[in-house]
Image (cartoon, rainbow, N blue to C red):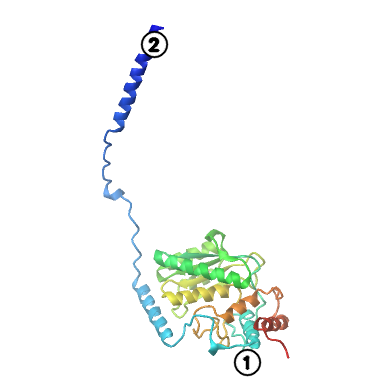
Amino acid sequence: MAARALFRKALAALLGLSLLGACEAGLRESLKPQARPGGLAPRAPAPHQPSEDSRKLAAYYTRLEQHLLAQGLLRQGGGGPDTEFDAEDLAENFEAIAFFDEHSGGRLGPGTARAASRFHPWQGPVRVAAIHGESVPRAQRRRDESALSDYLARLSRVTGRPVAQAASGRANFHVLFMGTDDSGELKDTVRRVWPGFPESRIEALADLPRDIYCLVHTNLPSARRGQERALAVIRAEHPDLMRLSCIHEEVAQGLGLSNDSPYARPSIFNDDEEFATLTTHDELLLKMLYDPRLKPGMSAAEARPIVERIARELMGETRS
């Protein structure tokens, strides 16, 4: 027994020395890391320096925005007492904007040929993704994402349809914010997000004349349910209000209001630039576009009595 007790004391003493050594070792000063060679240190990417062409274009659009504002154009808000409209106006504007191609003229005089289109709203969900070119600063990208998100939520409320942002790989509606310096990237992006997009159109998108501020392409007239696609291009050189105006017009047109009409007022679907953002009149057009009484594939003549009825309901008018 005495030997075992002696052994336990010796073992305890050894353990005590080990623990003490460990504590002392923990107090030793660690080695100071050496500075990494300069070539290995991570570097933030240098901000994009716009080309001379891009700077000139940005200056031009800034002057243009100021000129339009000075004329009382690029208005925001629902409209006003100077822009009254009734059910008949609403129905006629809807037919011109929803049943005709943007370049066909819509609502022209008697005897004038018009390239009419069948009724073509989205039948499946609308999943929207923003894609920015390398030339767009990060702060601007955040502002674009925020403006687009707010607008999509508004469109979803107005139409009663699922319209929301999505990752690029899941999106069927891509909004490209790209400038003159992003032409190569724009081409690659279009080919990636929309396989089979006509190559001639891709080349045209990468070299737009400066009087085209933004545009949208869709396959709505021929697309089957769930196969709808849209692609909008918004110039990166635009100042804030023109940029917002492009978001409002091109996304709404991509939903199926594909034409412009000089008679539509107050409206963004009018090339006179009077309004920059979606108006109360335009919200009513979107409500009509997604009213379940209007069926995809209807002609203007087939839809007209239904359109007139919906317009009167929305305006609170009844026939005398």
**Quadrant in which residue 99 is drawn:** bottom right
Instruction: Evaluate whether residue 127 shows in this view.
Output: no
- Number of marks drawn: 2
Residue 314 badge:
none
Comparing 254 with 306, the one in front is 306
Q: CA distance from mark 1 to mark 2?
A: 116 Å
Amino acid type at mark 2: Ala
Q: Quadrant of the N terminus?
A: top left
Residue 112: x, y in percent?
63, 90
Q: Position of residue 88 (x, y in %)?
A: 65, 88
Q: State which mark lies toward you, 1 or 2.
A: 2
Q: Amino acid at mark 1?
A: Gly
Eyeballing the image, is 117 above or below 5?
below
- Residue occupied by mark 2: 5
Classify residue 240 as left or right of residue 119.
left
Instruction: Please identify the quarter of the rendering in which residue 299 is found.
Output: bottom right
- Percent x, y of residue 312: 68, 84
Image point (62%, 79%), residue name: 285
The 10 Å Cα crowd at callout 2, few under 14, some 14 to 19, many 20 or more, is: few
How far across and how far down the image is residue 87, in percent? 65, 86
Q: Residue furthest bottom?
A: 110
SS under mark 2 = helix
Q: Nearer the viewer, residue 74 or 263?
A: 74
Q: Residue at x 47, y 72 (%)?
A: 234
Query: Residue drawn at (37%, 73%), measured in percent from left and top?
Result: 54
**For numbered disc 1, what is the local secondary structure?**
loop
Classify mark 1: residues with Cα within 10 Å, few (<14), some (14-19) or many (20+). few
Q: Give the residue displayed 26% in from the left and 45% down from the top.
A: 35
Q: Is residue 216 left or right of residue 5?
A: right
Query: 29 above or below 15?
Result: below
Camera-side residue: 101 or 159?
159
The residue that mark 1 highlights is: 109
